[in-house]
């Protein structure tokens, strides 16, 4: 007779297996995968420790665990991630929104505080930044991306989060933006260097879209383009606010200043890494706040 597995036994086995495969948080991932297979949240999994698994349930768990063992990101397997306390559908067509990017949203909101206005989100991916800004500030956002597949997912996310009326999506190349008079141009563009592209974790290298990652030889291609175009895309006194990779903030600030942008500032993420650079098309002087 085949062995009957309890939830706790499967959890222990899965944790060890994922650990052996080099997965970072094996216990947490095991809980979430088993929960997805059994349609339970983490508390539901704890409460079901002694429950025996039916063969069909075991097969579902095995299929999910196999995918994670091959280093497919947990978020793609679950199909969803939380960002800015909102649910986002994610597929391999979009970058998985990172918690660090919430700092970009915070800075975008600050830029809109003294004077609100229309927002342009360049490289929207899942729509995370555009949707978070629209949700919090109730502003109109044009969200662009070069990837039609990403835009489809972003559109679903806008609907799911109740901001489809505020956010418009369009396919566009960040190197050829249209003239406008936006108050805020916000972007988390691709910024990984060619050398770093060779050293990414398997979850990122093999599963996330390269288009969302590679920012050219030195990772700074998008920033040069955005800084050059900012004066024709933004109203006078508008803000260009971008996420940057670790160690890129000073170089990006130099690019912004060389392009004639003013009031350049940097903001660290919660790990103390300079993560956001902003600058204005407005007057000289220090930025408030
Ligand atoms: C780092 S991801 C950011 C996604 C999302 N904004 C976020 O913060 O999670 C960069 C995005 O830029 C898009 N992208 C790459 N090259 C582009 C280009 N030339 N023009 C417009 N979008 C581009 C990618 O498709 C991807 O969705």
Image (cartoon, rainbow, N blue to C red):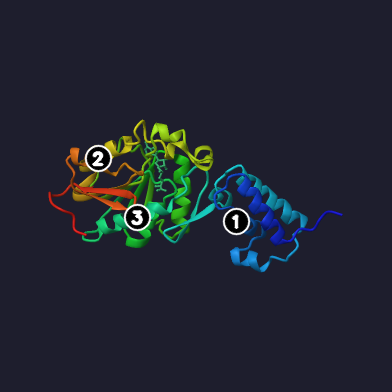
Residue positioned 17% across, 40% down in the render: 260
Of circles 2 and 3, which is in front? 3
Residue at mark 2 = 227
Q: Are marks 2 and 1 in contact (CB under 8 Å)?
A: no
Residue at mark 1 = 27
Q: Residue furthest bottom?
A: 47
Nearer to the camera, 273 or 84: 273
| Label 3 or label 1, whichever comes before in sequence order | 1
Q: Which mark is residue 103?
A: 3
Evaluate whether residue 183 shows in this view.
no
Residue positioned 43% across, 55% down in the render: 158
Q: Ligand 1 shows up in which quadrant of the image? A: top left
Dividing the picture into quadrants, the one containing residue 99 is bottom left
User: Label 3: few (<14), some or many (≥20) within 10 Å?
Assistant: some
User: Is residue 168 placed above or below 84 in the rendered structure?
Assistant: above
In-image side of 186 versus 63 (left or right): left
Nearer to the camera, 18 or 146: 18
User: Label 1: few (<14), some or many (≥20) within 10 Å?
Assistant: some
Of circles 3 and 1, which is in front? 1
> In terms of secondary structure, where does tag 2 sit?
helix
| Label 2 or label 1, whichever comes before in sequence order | 1
Measure how far apart labels 2 and 3 are at the Cα level: 20 Å
Nearer to the camera, 70 or 122: 70
> In terms of secondary structure, where does tag 1 sit?
helix
Residue 233 is situated, as x and y percent measured from the top left of the image, at 24, 43
């Amino acid at each position: 007779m085949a062995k009957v597995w309890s939830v706790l036994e499967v959890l222990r086995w899965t944790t060890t297996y994922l650990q052996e495969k080099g997965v970072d948080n094996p216990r947490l991932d095991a809980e979430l995968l088993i929960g997805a297979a059994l349609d339970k949240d983490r508390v539901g999994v704890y409460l079901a420790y002694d429950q025996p698994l039916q063969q069909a349930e075991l097969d579902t768990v095995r299929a999910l665990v196999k995918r994670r063992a091959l280093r497919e990101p947990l978020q793609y397997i679950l199909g969803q991630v939380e960002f800015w306390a909102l649910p986002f559908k994610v597929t391999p067509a979009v970058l998985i929104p990172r918690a660090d990017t919430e700092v970009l949203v915070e800075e975008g909101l600050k830029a809109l505080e003294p004077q609100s206005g229309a927002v342009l989100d360049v490289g929207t991916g899942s729509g995370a930044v555009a949707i978070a800004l629209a949700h919090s500030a109730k502003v109109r956002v044009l969200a662009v991306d070069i990837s039609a597949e990403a835009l489809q997912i972003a559109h679903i996310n806008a609907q799911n989060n109740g901001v489809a009326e505020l956010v418009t999506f369009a396919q566009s190349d960040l190197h050829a933006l249209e003239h406008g008079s936006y108050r805020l141009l916000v972007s988390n563009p691709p910024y990984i260097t060619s050398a770093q592209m060779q050293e990414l974790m398997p979850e990122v290298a093999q599963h996330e879209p390269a288009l969302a990652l590679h920012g050219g030889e030195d990772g700074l291609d998008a920033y040069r383009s955005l800084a050059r175009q900012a004066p024709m895309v933004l109203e006078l006194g508008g803000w260009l606010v971008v996420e940057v990779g670790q160690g890129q903030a000073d170089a990006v600030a130099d690019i912004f200043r060389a392009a004639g942008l003013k009031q350049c500032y940097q903001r660290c993420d919660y790990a103390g890494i300079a993560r956001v650079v902003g600058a204005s098309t407005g007057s000289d002087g220090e930025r408030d706040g």
